[in-house]
Image: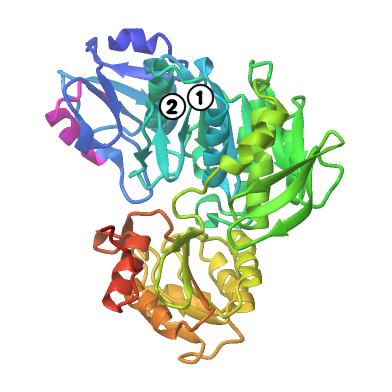
Amino acid sequence: MKITALLDNINNNIQKIGHLDPEITNLEFDSRRVSNGTLFFALKGIHTDGHNYIDKAITLGAKAICFSDDLPNYNPDILYIKVENTKEALSSFSTAFYNNPSKELKVIGVTGTDGKSTTVSLIDQLLELNGKRSGYISTISFKSGNIEEKNVLRQSTPEASQIHSILREMVKNNKEYAIVESTSHGLSNKTCRLKDVDFNTGVLTNITQEHLEFHGSLEQYRNDKGNLFRKISKTEKETSFGVVNLDDPEATNFISYAKPKKVYTYSLKNKNADLYPVDIRQTPVSSTFKLVFKGVEYETKLNLPGLFNIENLMATILAVYNLGDITFNNIVRSIPNLHSVKGRLNSVPTRGEFSIVVDYAHTPGSFEKVLPTIKEIITGRLIVVFGSAGERDVVKRPIQGEIADKFADIIVLTDEDPRLEDSIKIIDDIKAGIKNKREDENLFIIPNRREAIGRAIDLAQKGDMILTLGKGHETSMVYSHGSEPWNEIEVIKDILKEKGLNEYIKMED
């Protein structure tokens, strides 16, 4: 595409420097991925500034540069495009370059502090089980065709160019639906990652404290997540609607954000909601219950544990049903076939008389959901291994400690992506919330995560459960010197093997 043709579709206030009209083959904000024909965007990040990489981008073949700060010199062989906000420009250019793919899909955005990835997966599964063609973008993986691809970006919601590229691939692969995990970062006007995505449906799981290091306040965090529902209110897609957890204190705010569009509600306890459960019977691996919808009870079984997964399911059902293509009876028939996603309450087989479960929970809200659920279903002690991410919300750390102190019998504090922060300082912040444990008795400080998990295994007795939190599906651990490979489940399997506790597999004759 010629740059002039691309610019014809851009409404941003721009200033062209140079009279060239190069052919643009791709959009890029990472200089390491620049190739011949790239339009390079000099984004300003927390740790780096893309303006510092403009010369490198040109050397690698960039033909045009989008920037915001005055440059010391301008290459006469390059077209320069000056804008006020390069992140906003990246969104606008990406929408035009990929010919606005969200207009051709039914796009479901899922936001909230906890449960986003699971809800994205459940929506995708429920659609596919009923013969619909869907793709998704989530913390864990992407699916634009028939094969899931691991999300290696360490961003739940990628940058705008990546979002629109994946959505265009979905259109090419004849997808009808796109489910997009819509984080507070992605919805923020600071990043503009989802600014030009046209949503049909907005789903809110819950709002608890998270990412205050980025948003500054819980109010701003809520406000940024509310942008998804404001998009629902403004879209020209006539069938747009919202789905909200009526049990969440922020429910009324999100319902108001979506006006005049309809918002459907679900609840574990409020019978004024559009969908709620009764007669819940829980086991360590599943729940059986009745769903009440429009005055009719539907008995079903969900093969995922915990009340929070019933909440995720209800959000999923309302989103899928109100898209208008699948009957409620067919939805209910599909529920027993739904499965969990990687890193969410995944069991690791062991020959020991204890159990081990890996989960991604890393916020106070997710701790409040997961820990009491686990505590209720085990016969022995609950041993919890966790940390808190460096360079992220500091305020949540003692709250995590306080919640763990309430439900865990033994706590092992350890690393979880310390980044440039001191591990012990992070652990001390968590420890400040732990009042009922004594160090080296039922509270252990072991920054090395592998050693921490090993200690938890050594401590475990018959009937105990070890719960490792915070890493889940992730594939790396981030330290001051950079990233190191990390796979929590595989690490646990290795430790069990070293201790002679790996699962015994009988070989066939």
Q: Can you give x and y, in whole percent of width and height, for residue 254 in the image?
A: 72, 39
Does dot 2 land on a helix, a strand or a loop?
Answer: helix
Give the residue at x 58% y 34%: 126
Using a 10 Å C-alpha cutoff, classify the residue at mark 1 as few (fewer than 14 neighbours), some (14 to 19) or many (20 or more).
Answer: some
Q: Give the labeled residue for mark 2.
A: 91
* N-terminal-most mark, 2 or 1: 2
- Give the x, y percent position of residue 205: 64, 46
Instruction: Find the distance from the CA under tag 2 to the CA under tag 1.
Output: 6 Å
Label disc, if present, on residue 461 of the rendered structure: none
Which stretch did the figure color magenta?
Answer: 52-65
**How many residues crowd mark 2 within 10 Å: few (<14), some (14–19), many (20+)?**
many
Give the camera-side residue of 450 and 307: 307
Identify the amino acid type marked 2.
Answer: Ser
- What residue does disc 1 label? 196
Is 18 drawn above or below residue 374 in the view shown?
above
Pointer 2 and pointer 1: residues touching (CB < 8 Å)?
Answer: yes
* Quadrant of the snapshot with the C terminus: bottom left
Q: Which residue shows up at 55% across the image and 50% down it?
A: 215
Which corner quadrant of the image does residue 456 belong to?
bottom left
Q: Residue at x 72, y 29 (%)?
A: 328
